[in-house]
Image: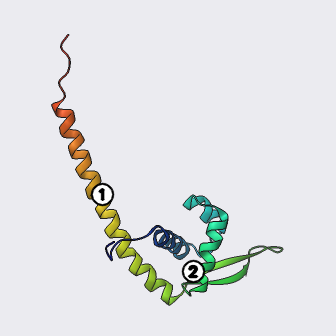
Amino acid sequence: MKTSDISKYEALKFSVMRIVEANPNVTQRELNQELGISLGRVNYCLNALTEIGFIKVENFKASSTKWRYAYILTPSGIAEKAALTGKFLARKLREYDALKAEIGAIQKEAQTVVEPHT
């Protein structure tokens, strides 16, 4: 594995941190829906990111009767997200190059197909 490779867990961490940075008031249910993973997995990931110090959780009052959380990236979380951004971008560029090559090969095959004569 290259140092620029990103694991599935790192990709999940990266996705969560991107969403949290864009919307600190995001709920776990919204994360679950946007990422397509279970609520339990969202909760586990947020707890892990909080435990290692990448995310700070703060309470805020959402209405007169309910409390919600705000998820805020810490300075170390911002640094980790920046590091993961490079890895994620490198992976996506490799995937893009592979897909482009595959499309080129399929286009070449399609050009060599001879239509049946009627």
The numbered disc on residue 49 is 2
11 or 15: nearer the viewer: 11
Give the SS element for disc 1.
helix
Residue name at image x 49 percent, y 72 percent? 18
Q: Is residue 104 above or below residue 46?
A: above
Q: Is residue 68 left or right of residue 95?
A: right
Crowd rating for badge 2 (residues with CA inside 10 Å; few <14, some 14–19, many 20+): some
The numbered disc on residue 24 is none
Residue name at image x 35 percent, y 71 percent? 5
Answer with the quarter of the image where residue 39 lies: bottom right
Residue 104 at x, y percent in the picture: 21, 46
What is the C-alpha distance between the residues marked 1 and 2?
A: 29 Å
Q: Is residue 9 left or right of residue 27?
A: left
Q: Is residue 81 left or right of residue 51?
A: left
Q: Earlier in the sequence, mark 1 or mark 2?
A: 2
Answer with the quarter of the image where residue 46 lies: bottom right
Crowd rating for badge 1 (residues with CA inside 10 Å; few <14, some 14–19, many 20+): few
Residue name at image x 27 percent, y 55 percent? 98
Q: Amino acid at mark 1?
A: Tyr
The numbered disc on residue 96 is 1
Residue 7 at x, y percent in the picture: 43, 70
- In the picture as drawn, the residue positioned furthest to the top comes out as 118
Which quadrant does the C terminus fall into?
top left
Count of picture labels: 2
